Image (cartoon, rainbow, N blue to C red):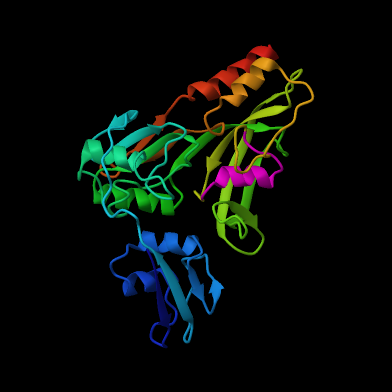
Amino acid sequence: MNNTIKFLINKKESGQRLDVFLSKKISHLTRSYIKNNIDSGNVKINKKIINYPSTKIKKDDFIIIKIIEDKIQRITPAKIKLDIRFEDKDILIINKPAGMVVHPGAGNYKKTLANALTYYYKNKLSNINGNLRPGIVHRIDKETSGLLVIAKNNLSHFSLGKQFNNHSIKRKYIALIWGVVRPLNGKIETLITRNKKYRQLMTVSDINGKKAITHYKTLKVFNLKDIPKISLIECELETGRTHQIRVHMKYKGTSLLGDKQYGKKKIKFKKINKEFESNLSVLNGQTLHAKSLGFLHPTKKKFVHFESELPADFKKILHLLEKLGD
């Protein structure tokens, strides 16, 4: 159900952040939920869509927010196998498979990581982000595999959230991309905002959006017969924007193998290695894997680091490229 709420800003309210103001006024909704509503284009100031939660409101601003009520108020537990790489009383480290959504939304309410966490841990996780996101501190895309940290209590959630906000969390990804990115090693720094035409996608902007910084280096370039040129790259995130690596690769004129949203709709090959083509056709998601995660442990106050191996289908393509290159 959709509800529309309107506000006219007075002198006393002027100067506040938009998300802070709305979360105070609409007390039954969490601030993170308000932020998601803003990010999704459901808030207007003076009839103009605003996508930035940090926007400062002014006297006489006319705010309209469309509240998209959740279809479910409580998450449904689901017995879905989890690949747990580490666990103590404060945190969980999960190795998420490609194809799994992190938390409910957009038509997927039963087969997410959050549903599985609720089944195994019930109410023994942090609740800072509300009922639908138990323990969820950060996300990776549905079709991306790799490591996530889950908070088992609110103290841990607060500590981890602060580290993410301070950009002190160490996150490295491995990816296979079409062609070669120039220069081979570098730093991509842009603003990222929602695509005005396709709201589920993100795009680089010169004037709007949130700062996004990706450090990348080319590990190997595969220039093989009957296979388009492909590069193996490592990306380290300084910020964690939605679809950041995929958007930045598109900005650099390339895309990840298997990326159906930011890659070309259909890639035509004049001549192609049949084994490679077969492996590419059954790829589960894009070739993007969150391979390592490092942070200051919330209670032990020492730096901890975790690594995970590539998923089987990603590894199969990489091994074939290496074999053909020998």
Q: Residue at x 56, y 31 (%)?
A: 287
If the image is split into quadrants, where does the N terminus sit?
A: bottom left
In the rendered image, residue 245 lying in the magenta stretch gets the answer yes
The residue at 56%/24% (across/down) is: 282
Q: Position of residue 139 (x, y in %)?
A: 42, 45
Report x, y in % for residue 218.
Answer: 65, 32
Asked if the stretch drawn in magenta spans residue 89, the answer is no
**As drawn, 136 above or below 259:** below
Residue 288 seen in this snapshot:
yes
Asked if 248 appears above or below 17 in the picture, the reply is above
Q: Give the percent coordinates (x, y) of residue 318.
A: 59, 21
On the image, the x and y values in percent for residue 72 come to: 31, 53
Nearest the camera: 94 or 81? 81
User: Does the image show residue 321?
Assistant: no
Between residues 107 and 176, which one lies in front from this camera angle?
107
- What is the magenta range? 242-256
- Corner quadrant of residue 306: top left
Residue located at (71% from left, 43% from top) = 253
The structure residue drawn at horizontal position 69% and vertical position 32%, both measured from the top left corner, is: 178
Extreme right residue here? Answer: 270
Query: Which quadrant of the rendered structure holds the C terminus?
Result: top right
Total marks shown come to 0
Quadrant of the image occupied by residue 235: top right
Q: Is residue 298 left or right of residue 325?
A: left
